[in-house]
Amino acid sequence: MSPSHAPRWIATASALGGVALVVGTACSVGTGEGEISGSLVLRDCGVAIPSYRLRPTFFGADYVTNPGSRDGEESPLVTIRVQRGSYRESFSDGLIVTVYAVNEIVRSHLGEPLALTAIGEGRRRLVDVTFYAQESCDSGYPDEFWRTPGILHASAGTLTFHALHAPDLDGDDTEISAELDGAVFTADRDPEGRRAELSGFFRFFYQRGTPAQVFP
């Protein structure tokens, strides 16, 4: 099988990266609410939506031990998925938020807008956000293998956590709440033709338990 004909889930998994795979296959699902809206352009997919709305219905998070440490202290790493529907990422629209230092944010940065910067700029980042539009832009096997998956990374804007579950600090407070403001998502290739600008919020309660089933 040639790379251009690779199954859709393989192409998406590769683009989203290893952390996203953890979320997609083992996240604990919580009950929540949210609204994220803005604009979306995926020119090579024929998508131009000036009034885009995500309308998330699926909220999940996965806490793992961070292999690194900051200032000599280990801190959990959490990946958060806020998505329309409960399908795999390769068939849905949604956000993946990666928080690299949960304890530091809870202690010092709640209520503070955290700058979203492009990957590879050499700056220390507390958080990264990826937006995927795989429902809005079908790609991959079996029909639309010629289309590039609609996966964009935040390069500007802010994310503000108003609450974040930190199991090391307070295991009873399970709320996760954040506000996205003026976030600009682009792709390395054709950043003007593959672009989203989104703002909004999400709020849910983390529930420890059996991981979410990845099939609808």
Image (tube, rainbow, N blue to C red):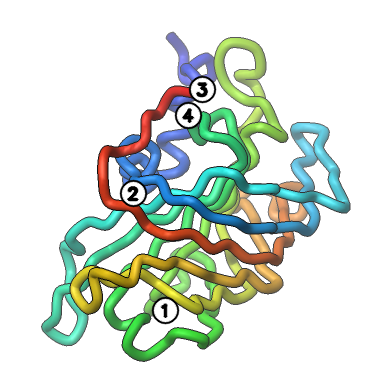
Q: What is the secondary structure assignment of the residue under circle 1?
A: loop
Give the x, y percent position of residue 52.
80, 50
Q: CA distance from mark 4 to mark 1?
A: 28 Å
Within 10 Å of disc 3 (Cα), the crowding (few <14, some 14-19, many 20+) is: many
Query: Which amino acid type is shown beneath numbered disc 3?
Result: Arg
Q: CA distance from mark 3 to mark 2?
A: 18 Å
Q: Residue placed farthest to the bottom in the image?
A: 108
Residue nearer the viewer, 109 or 14: 109
- Residue that badge 2 annotates: 19
Q: CA distance from mark 4 to mark 2?
A: 15 Å
Q: Are marks 4 and 3 in contact (CB under 8 Å)?
A: yes
Q: CA distance from mark 4 to mark 3?
A: 5 Å
- Residue that badge 1 annotates: 123
Query: Which amino acid type is shown beneath numbered disc 1?
Result: Arg
Q: Are marks 1 and 2 in contact (CB under 8 Å)?
A: no
Q: Earlier in the sequence, mark 3 or mark 1?
A: 3
Quick check: 73 left or right of 54?
Answer: left
Q: Earlier in the sequence, mark 4 or mark 2?
A: 4
- Residue that badge 3 annotates: 8
Residue located at (52% from left, 34% from top) = 86
